[in-house]
Image (tube, coloured by chain):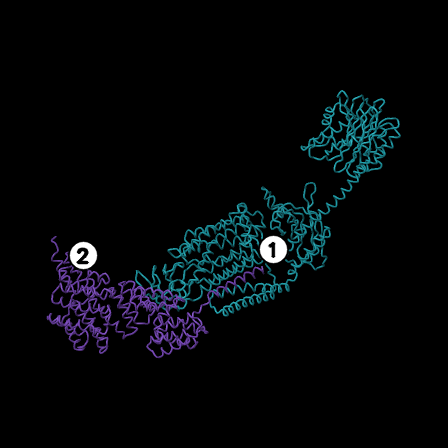
Chain colours: A purple, B cyan
Amino acid sequence: MKRSALFTGLVLIALSVAIAHWARPSRDWTTASAQAAKLLAEGETDLRAFRWQQAERTLAAAVEADPGFAMARAAHAEALATLGESERSRRAAQQADSLAQLLRDSAERLAIQLRLTAYYPPLAASRDSLLDLLEGQRPDCLIVAITRARQAEQRRDAAAEAAAWHDALRIDPNFAGAWNQLGYLAARQGRYEDAEGYLSKYAFLAPDLANPHDSLGEILAQQGKYERAELEFKTSLSLQPDFFPSLLTLAQVYVERGQIERGVQLLEKVRAQIAGTDWERRVDGTLMRTYYDHELRDALSKAVARWLAAHPQDWQAAYYRAVALGLAGQPAQASAACDTFAASLPRAPWFDGTEATRDRAMVLVHNCRGMLALEAGVADSACAHFAAALKASSDAAPSETWSLRLNHAKSLLLAGDPASALAQARAVLDVNPRRLRALSLETRALLALDRRDEAREALARLREALAAADVSVVEAFENASYVRELSATRPAP
Amino acid sequence: MTPERSHGHLPAWLAGLLASQGVHLLLGLLAVAVSIFAVVDATQQRPNDGTVWLLGRPEIVVLEAPTRPGSTPSLLRPDDRILGIANRLVRTPQEAASLLRRQHVGSPVEYLVRRDGQDIVVPVQLTGFRVADRFYAYNIVLALIYLAIGFAVYARSLNDQPARLFFMLCLLFSIFFVTNLNRSSYFWGDIITQNAGAFARFLLPALFLHFFLVFPDKKLTLTRYSYAEPLLYLLPVMFYVRFTLDQFFGSRAPRIGTVQWLALGICFSLGLIALLHSYMSYRDPLQKQRVRILTIGTIAGVLPFLVFKVGLEEMTANSELAWLGIAPLAALPASFGYCIARYRIMQVEVMLKRSLIYTVLTAVVVTAYFALALGMGVLFARLSGLTSQLVMVGATLGIAAVLWPVRSRTQDLLDRRFFRNRTHLASVLQEFSREIPRLIQREALLERVGSRLCRILDLPGLAVYLREERAGATAWALAGRTETGETTAAPVPTAPEFPPQLELNATITRLERFNEPFWIERPGTDPRALGPAVTREQEELAQRLAEQESLDRAGIALLVPLASQGRLVGLFALPHKHSDDAFHVQDLDLLTIVAGQVALQVENSRLYEEEIEKQKLDEQLALARSIQSRLLPSRLPTVPGVELSAVNISSAQVSGDYYDLIVRPDGQLGLVVSDVSGKGIPASLLASSLQAALRAHCDNSDSPGHILQRVNKHLHASTDPQHFATLFLGFYDPRTRRLRYSSGGHNPPILRRAAGAIELCEEGGLPLGAFDFGEYAEGETQLDAGDVLLLYTDGLTEACDAAGEEFGTAGVERVLHLCHGCSAGELVRTLGSELQRFCGRRETDDDVTMLVLKVGGQATTLDSEGAAAAAARGE
């Protein structure tokens, strides 16, 4: 019995020791302090969840716990850089680099230096070589994945970038930034449901930040999920009341739902708050687009005049001038203004001569000409310009082309090609089935094609989408006309 | 102690493993660890979302979101896929459990879930206690009681099957009480408690049934069909495998289904029926009394359990009355405890008379042991830098097991201090083992062993009865008796007057069957009150009760069988102790072991004595054979006109046959054949005396009758009346060919005439030496050429074949006819060979002596007779 007890006890102790050995947390980075290692892990978590202030405090504590802890100093440098404290960040990075030189573990040294390349200019040039070296030694290192993703982003290689971010998430699934990047990549590729999933996780992981909720709200709004989008924007604004992107997109959501007055009021309110800043231009742009889309000509003319008065020398001034002339029924002058706009584009701050910026310039010019042709009733010309604009924006996110598509659809209807118009409208509706302009154009195209049953169904969807809209919204009038048209042509019983 | 091997159907290694105390200890520790874990897991306040997940799936899909009493309904819904908890993403149930542990009870926690293809955030209110059962504390107490009685029975009993099964049963019951199958969010907790709980629930009924199939007596069916035992566990194991698979691959939360509960309930019911059957089938009131309380307690405990717990709660999910099923289960350990204390069932020793100081000291030792183990476990965890509860529990248990010998040694010291005599048993056994083999003399052996046992066991006396076979019947005779001679004040028992012989039949049958110590208790029932026995069982019972009554009257308290090689060779009969204490298990261990050694030594002693006797006998036989050979003439005389031939074939035991040929001075030939009563040396000596007397008288007289009369008187005067001899004496005159003879009670010689007629020489009187009176008539007959006279002893005619048929005079006459015309020597040889053929391999029990006289043939010599004798022996 005693021998059995002894044997059993020894077996249990051996098992416990084995489990203890197996369960002992491994330390990836060289430090003499377990406390510092723990603080680094917590700080990294905060950093990747965009809790920068908290991350900075925790990482500072880690550095304090072990002043010779190179990786903690590198992480602290990153946190400081993110918070905009570049001088402190530079000093921290310098210290981290010096400490890294003393490390025996070459992989750790490489990892620290690779990390610093993003924030410490003296190392930036050696990023690719450092990446190659570290990838050979530690392919599963999070820093490697992040650097690869940034490399791919610079190359505009979306697939490689997505793969790198997925690698990063395999290492740390709570890396909020990676989810954010994946969300935007998916949205650019038109994978809105995926984007929603990624951004939901991004918002879940960084619940205290306004940006994730704003991003999620934007994706939701693009899919016509206005109610949830509104909640996300409100969450974003509750976290950061001066987070203007959310206010701007929330106003757009109101407009998209046909609540023009509410949307415009919000935009005007925002405009008053941000007067004199760069944001004012964006708000004005949104206001003018809203007026144009909903055929509020007087309001559009006033807004354009206001804008031109405020920014007479801006690179967009010729564009808005062309719009104003077009609205005033002076097509020749408008066309000349548009030519001036095209000629001034190379002076735009974003224009760098690359193919992408050239495409963007082409889109703007064709859009401008298309709008003017449409205003002048020259349907074929409008169609041609909008088609060219769409072709030039093939790399853009689908949602960024919707305005073009709907104008193209309008011009196609005018040109007597309702089938092509229907295709353009449905390309929008496939993503956002509640977009009023698209629903209205779909109905009109179906009526033109004499597909009445489908037209009735489309009309029903339009009426449903108009439930919360203002009564004066243009789509409401169009809806009434469609009803009349369908009633008038109803076959006799 | 060698465990019994009752697993004949299992491989030896598995049977050994099942009977291994190390394995039992490990299982016991495991059960304790699981129980502690389950209790802590159930009662510790930990945040819980109330959902149920499948453990084996990579994703966390909500299977159930039950509403817990006292908590707000969960916003989680079945089929929700949990992606994150508390702003952290989770990929596995382990991660989810780990995150939940860090939350606070009552606080809302945001869950990121995928529902209908959309990722949404759901606030979840976390609840606290996992088990909200008001009666859980009672369950814990019950579990403790079951664990305590289980360990006590195992530690204090012999390692036999019922005790083992009872131990396991208690372990499973305790796990059953402290575990519940309510799922929770705790990954490891769930795995351990769910599996342990399900394992206990599935196995418990089968074990319950198994236990009552071997206890109180093993059912005959189980003995006959040994494979039935493992078969009992087939269904539970299948259920458990299904349950386990459901945890990983199922589509819903694994649970014990209605059909499974039904099957398990049937197992429980069958167990109860088996117990009831055992109780009802006992004819013996003593046996019945022993299990009565136990039967009542078990039924009273288990029946409500089946109705309210299994029937209502588990099968209909009505937990309102579940406590009615659990509460009565206390009756089970209570009734077993009572029967153990009162009747020592399962041979469990219970020392209720331990002193308070001893109890307190034992408690101190146990407490110190647990405190030390716990302290070292915590120290181990701290030194290893791990805060994992699993590691700490494992290390603590391991250290507890390592410290067990220390605790055991300390307890031994304590026991030695308080129970000095008992703790000397081991050394006593060693002494016995050394001493007993040296004691070859039975009396010395029994005396030494008896006195030593009396001293060790505090007995006033002890008797040893040994088996004796008398006239085909077995008797138990007093072979040794020891008394301590201590004078003690009344009412302390004194040594009883052990009867010289025990009349035991039914008791012996029982002892032979079970070969274990047998308590003599005063029967609660008067054997006479049982009425006339109708069946054999009733008759046996009545007889056993009567025997017990007589043993009890004789002051015998315990009978211990002395068995050697499966044969009962004797009994220890023990009276009550001086202290009037009961016999403990250690006492029985000692007695059983010593009894085995003594039995072996008694057998050795018997064989030794037999060997000595045999040697003596062999010596006597050699002497007798020597004497007898000297009685026989070394050469046969040569007498003209007759052929002579003679042979004496000695049997193994040397009887008193002899033949003689006396040539008188007047030329007559004296023919003598004699058979003396008895065997061996006495018979040889008597034959020698007879021959001397006969030869002396032959010189003085020529009348055979007269000579025999004188020899008779001489013999009667010089020997005991029971010693006698038969003898034929004839005088043949070669000149006249006449034969005068007289027979002293001897087989009449056969005279075969040359023409073939058979005549018997029957004249004579009584055997010689039996009586001092008697006349011996003489006969006379004329012999002619070709006549053959055969003198013989009864060894020839009474020799038997394998079927027990005698050779008889008919056989002899047949050979005489066959050997018509043969010489005397040929006749003797033919008779010898025919006799051997007749007897076959069977040896003759008696000497065979033949003397042949053939008239008108050639003379013959002894050399040829030697050859004839050799032929007759088959050499």
Position of A5 relative to A209 (above/below): above
Q: Which residue occupies the foreground of this view, B267 or B137?
A: B267
Question: In the image as oriented, which residue stretches furthest toward the top?
Answer: B755
Label at residue A454:
2
Which secondary structure lies at badge 2? helix
Front position among marks 1 and 2: 2
Relative to B13, say whether A427 is above or below: below
Quadrant in the picture for residue A406: bottom left
- Indicate the position of residue A236 as horizontal and vertical percent values: 29, 71
The answer to whether residue B540 is left or right of residue B747 is left
Q: Is disc 1 placed on a helix, strand or loop?
A: loop
Give the side of residue B576 with respect to residue A176, left or right: right
Q: Closer to the camera, B363 or A22?
A: A22
Parent chain of label 1: B
Chain assignment, label 2: A
Amino acid residing under circle 1: Met
Specify the quadrant of the image occupied by residue B471.
top right
Quadrant (top left/top right/bottom left/bottom right) for the N terminus of chain A: bottom right
Q: Position of residue B313 (x, y in %)?
A: 42, 56
Q: Which residue is mark 1?
A: B1
Q: Is residue B766 visible?
A: no
x then y, percent, for residue B195: 45, 58
Please tell me how crowded label 1 is: few (under 14), some (14-19), or many (20+) other residues with Cα within 10 Å. Answer: few
Q: CA distance from mark 1 to mark 2?
A: 92 Å
- Going by the numbered disc 2, the residue's amino acid type is Glu
Identify the image quadrant of residue B739.
top right
The answer to whether residue B541 is seen in the rendering is: yes
Q: Is residue A122 above or below residue B167?
A: below
Q: Which mark is residue A141?
A: none
